[in-house]
Amino acid sequence: MRYNTFILFGAPGSGKGTQGKTLGTIPRFYHCACGDVFRSIDTRTKVGRAFLEYSSKGQLVPDDITVELWREAIDAAVEGHKFKPDIDTLVLDGIPRNVGQARIMEEMIDVKKVFHLACPSRETLFYRLKKRALKDNRLDDANERVIQRRLDIYETESKPVLSYYSNELVTVVDATQPPARVLLDILKSLNGVYEPAAV
């Protein structure tokens, strides 16, 4: 079964997590943040150990391992009745991060919409990422070189994902607006276009 899916897509600091969390509180939407999945990895599993082996050495984790970890988290949500695929829409944030992952996930997700949270101003992204890092006490993430590197990786590796999906699926949302306006734009674009299954 392929899951009905919305993808929240954008540079680090564009507000994907904020919008995902909010959408996840609306009935019939299930939010899965890839960052949360990676932070709660069970290292006793084979795929968990494989992930740790790469990440602990600072190496890039292969796409198939990343997607497998994500799949395990989704399977657990289905088994725990948190995500009911027959009536819920999956809201993804942080995955797919590159075209390779998008290809592997094709057999698992039926993408109905990609919301591109566009934030052309690097200064805004810098400011948001720094503020978030200090708020969450992740001082390494407040380092300007670290932020610059994350934004560069997004441009080279992640942004091509937008071209992987057809133009009709991609909705551009101005992420420089206040979060409530961004949410309003997302919900407006869904209105009449896509109705989650009735209970």
Image (spheres, rainbow, N blue to C red):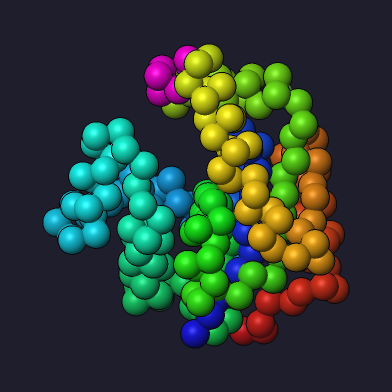
Q: Is residue 93 left or right of residue 127?
A: left
> Of residues 98 and 144, which is closer to you in this image?
98
Q: Is residue 184 above or below residue 149?
A: below
x and y, in percent, of residue 176 in the image? 77, 33
In the image, farthest residue toward the left: 44
Quarter of the image where one finds residue 122: top right
**Is 94 or 57 nearer to us in this picture?**
57
- The answer to whether residue 155 of the structure is visible from this angle is yes
**Image check: 97 left or right of 78?**
right
Residue 187 visible to the viewer = no
Count of numbered circles in the view = 0
Residue at image x 64%, y 70%?
111
Q: Position of residue 90 (x, y in %)?
A: 56, 67
Q: Is residue 53 magenta?
A: no
**Residue at figure coordinates x 52%, y 30% from the top left:** 150
Q: Which residues are magenta?
A: 137-143
Q: Magenta stretch containing residue 140, yes or no?
A: yes
Q: Residue at x 53, y 66 (%)?
A: 103
Q: Is residue 123 above or below residue 18?
A: above
In the rendered view, tell whether residue 87 sits above or below residue 20: below
**Quadrant of residue 86 in the image?**
bottom right
Q: Position of residue 101 (x, y in %)?
A: 49, 59
Q: Quadrant of the C terminus?
A: bottom right
Q: Which percent across, then down, holds residue 105?
A: 50, 68
Q: Is residue 22 left or right of residue 58?
A: right
Q: Name which residue lies at 69% across and 53% down.
A: 162
